[in-house]
Amino acid sequence: MTRLLLALGALVAARAEASDPKPDPKGAAFFEAKIRPVLVEHCFRCHSADAQKAGKLKGGLRLDTRDGLRGGGDSGPAVVAKDGDSLLLKAIRHDGDLKMPAAKLPAAVVADFEAWVAMGAPDPRAADAAPARDPKTHWAFRPIVRPPVPAVKGKDGVLNPVDAFVLAKLEAAGLAPAPPADRATLLRRATFDLTGLPPTPDEVDAFLKDDGKDAYAGVVDRLLASPRHGERYGRHWLDVVRYADSAGYETDDPYPTAWRYRDYVIASLNADKPFDRFVKEQLAGDELWPDSAEAATATGFLAVGPFAFEGGIGRADVVEYQRRTDLADTTGEAFLGLTVGCARCHNHKFDPISHLDYFGLQAVFAASKPKAAKNAAADGPAMTLTHVAAPPAVRQLRRGELDAPLGVAPPAVPRALPGGGEVAADPKRRRAALATWVTAADNPLTARVIANRVWQWHFGAGLVRTPNDLGTQGEAPTHPELLDWLASELRDHGWSLKHLHRVIMASATYRRAGRGAASAKDPENRLLARFPRRRLEAEAIWDHLHATAGTIDLTAGGPPVYPPVSREALGNKLNVKWESDKYKDQWTRRAVYLVNRRSLVLPFAEAFNVALPVASAGTRDRTVVAPQALELLNGPVAVGQARAFAGRLLRECGTDPAKIADRAWVLAYGRPIRPDERADVVAFLKVERPAGKRPTPLGLPADAAVDPGFAAGVVECALALMNANEFVYVD
Amino acid sequence: MTAPAVLSRRQMLARTGLGFGAVALADLLARDGRLAAAPPDPLAPKKPHFPAKARSVIWLFMHGGPSQVDTFDPKPALAKFDGQPPPAEYHGLKLQFTDPARQKLMASRMGFVRCGRSGLEMADAFEAFRGCADDVAVLRGVHHGVFNHTPGIYLMNTGHDRMGRPATGAWVTYGLGCEADDLPAFVVMNDGPLKPGAGVWGSGYLPAAHQGTNLRPGKAPIPNLAPPPELAGADQRRALDLAQRLNRRHADERDGDAQLEARIASYELAFRMQAAAPEATDLAREPRRVRDLYGGGFGEQCLIARRLVERGVRFVQIYHGCGGGGWDTHGGNYGGHLKLIRSIDRGCAGLLKDLKARGLLESTLVVWGGEFGRTPTTEGGDGRDHNPYGFSMWLAGGGVKGGRAVGGTDDLGFKAVRDPLHVHDLHATLLRLLGLDHRRLTYFHQGRPQRLTDVFGDHDIADRLTAG
């Protein structure tokens, strides 16, 4: 037990040192006479500050300081007072895998070390001057205090406090904000932002005609009330929780009822469920609200992770360890914005998460197992958890290796953070304790993390651009006060995300034009003088194609839809049954309802940088690559929707090129066409297409006498419009 | 008076050697502060950390796990103790299906011959490949600890036995970019579905531009390369021209935003690829004698690999034995291996000879091997189980001196005992041969700089392999 208590990470050790009594003079003398010279002569070459500077530090272990020696390195504490099995002793005895130094020390020297450890390892050296790990010094670990709204000169650019924070930085940098966006741009921006869909022609028309003062606020309210909103923001959240409909790995077993968790997420966001409640339900809904089916469904968060079912032929303990690792790492990144996974192999080098804390977090999850969910019927119950009556003790693992167990790690939340420490050992209350701690009023991370994500979902980049890492290795916030203001605003308004959306979208900052040259002073537009232009995500491009073509099916919820996938793409994976024909009448549903198989990312989604559901994804890659162009130019989805778009234009406009052009513009770009653009398209449609060109199946009425050559031109035009930058970028 | 700047930017976009698909404007950004942040071209050719001979890689991946004692690691002792139980030290060895304690040692039925001037030994079933012995360095001491196919394939490719990490090919294109501007940087060919799926050549947390592109022989080697029938030829170009006219106006009104310019350029690249990719895979353009040198099936993929490397592709992987068990001979090991060896023999030999004849072998590192080896003991009557503890791979070209075996297993072929080379060290070695320091090739993700070799790989043997 002593060993257990002492086998803490460097952080905790360092705290303990502060209260350590000064070693008695006899012990100190023994250290100076018998121990220190040996350390200097035989150990410092690889285990000292100098070795570290030279990049030659071995095993992450420093022996030139008291804390280094006690806190230990990658393999755990080197010395535990009065423990005759201390790693250092075993190593110098050459008793085990680790034999140090290579040339064994004389027996008398080994005996001195044994005697010294038995004395309690007295070490008179001053406490380590190692990097400060006091959580109070890093911004994200400090309490959230609502900052005062700064005073700014450009008062008329301030619609709400958000603008004051942004403008203060702009003024300090000598930058002027862009003027407000034009109305069509603003409507398209807000509609894609809140619903992931383009505005309809009627919505465009209505907003352009309504110059009332409340027109825009009305639009925001309408969009927030739309069921499409939960689908859009739900998809954002599903990235964060690495949602998928299958287990991954070789067998990639389907999770036939994982969709119930996906629908729970969408419904919760539509209902504006308080975010703290939303978090608690996902971490511990079953423990906190045992009678609520909804809260049980929420724990699907814990059940839909990657899982190696082929474990039957491998090692069950490996599979279980991978499961707990996924849960600890995902929980850390998703809710706390901390890369706790770094502490799996050693104390977190930069953030206040010790090796013991990390396995304590794993121990929280050791008490729950997913109910066997594979092979369930698609209309079966949600994927949930069951408690293990007598959960096995979780051990700290040297370097994270399963075959190198150290002491037991009791269930705990990070000790150095406010309210941290061991939690109830009761297997049925562990996650409840974690959830309560994550959402506690004094937890400095949770509110900041979600406020930052919400900002990112509106502006394309967070105030902290590493949304899953607010720790010391993450980026610093561009507007720390604004982030804290938003976080406290969220907490003060019942954790209402919709309130936060309204506040952000009501700001002048959100409503600025995206045009205007970048300033050399802020080439990345981090200070938000302009609204950041950005490419739509894979799902929004999919939805946009279908909405513009008029084919989109807005049915909500239910089992995932298998769209057609080329034989070649399927050919790369065994074991995946892809019965897409059964879903033929649902192929044009919103992308959020398409299946997410871990072993086979849909080619369309993959081309446009969808996140891999193997770990929490805070951001998406936005590389511009040629395969994306091929996907939209030649791929079956885009070509199919271009044909449907052409058919729609011919049905709605007949064969009048100007009418077709006008209608196409408002459907594709949400704005009226300009004369030069109309002239270009009309000329394009009038080009003689070779005779004999067969009509494409455009869904025209049987009596529609459309010249096949003209129809082909409309298809070409539709495809061109869907490929143009304006289609996939939002200003 | 900004017109000249705009013009030069367009000209540069039209001319710069832009990587497959991704368009680079970082340098433009530097000289034109007006541009918004553009994604830098992830595939622009980059200088290696050190000078190196190897510039590209062709990795022949033998799916299923080839048996070392039946290919490149002859074990006379195994013949001596054929049919006897293995020594106690191997009992309880963690294998997938068998415990050696209950199995018998099984001699190889292959004949082994000394080949070339070097006298390097290999199974005589390699009738053509035998002639390449002097160019081949066999690594007889490769090892790791993962005995299942899927995690083993992940480990061999990504350095981790879990899904979701970048493949070696992705790391290499991340480190070196790509010389070809109209072909993918990292190409994968396979002869059937692979157990773990396409994640094996994924880019993991690296930018998606680094993921492997699956390429199939024939007229449509890359997905979506062919326009729909009603938009073939001139019609497609006309539609593209309309889109680009719209794009031009759109971008000009937005101060030539670099991300918009990048996308405009990506369409021209895509248009060029439609022609370049089928050309690169069209073997009808090769003379008959070259096609004969490689043989069919696997050989054709090897020939495509040579054409790709010749055109500047950085990393090519060919998976052999997919769709079924491949080299996974749990039963009928001898017959199975004989057939498998014959199916790759000409391809391997043709590739090395042809590369050498064209002067490409020095700059092309060829890698051969599976996710693990097989046991020297039986499984069932005549099969062999998986064995990750000691197995053989070989390297050729890229500055590697051939005609020798490096490292070795114990007398029976169970475990690597002489100069064991862990997979992490193999990865470090491959990177080093390409001029990359595995410690410096990092990508910041999940709170720390990530590497192909994680925190391992400190024992690369590149210097040894390139020394005379």
Image: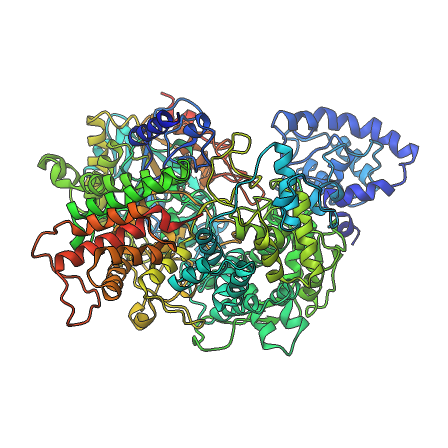
Q: Which residue sits at x=38%, y=62%?
A: A201
**Left or right, residue B46 beside residue B132:** right
Q: Is residue A147 visible?
A: yes
User: Which residue appears at 44% of the width and 30% of the height?
Assistant: B29
For residue A697, above or below residue B178: below
Instruction: Tally the marks.
Output: 0
Q: Can you see residue B320?
A: no
In the displayed structure image, the side of residue B400 where residue A294 appears, left or right:
right
In this view, the residue farthest toward the right is A25
Estimate the x, y position of residue B457 in percent, counting from the top left: 50, 35
Instruction: Tell me where residue A435 sits by quadrant.
Output: bottom right
Q: Is residue A157 above or below residue A273?
A: above
- Left or right: residue A510 versus residue B383 is right
Q: Residue A95, percent across and down?
A: 66, 41
* Residue in view at x 76 percent, y 50 percent: A3
Vertical relation: A80 (above or below) A667:
above
Q: Is residue A653 above or below residue A417?
A: below
Q: Looking at the picture, how far across and down is residue A668, in whole percent?
A: 34, 55
Say which quarter of the image contains residue B25.
top left
> What's the colour scheme?
rainbow
Judging depth in this view, the residue of A631 and B115 nearest the camera is A631
**Pick the front one: B447 or A663:** A663
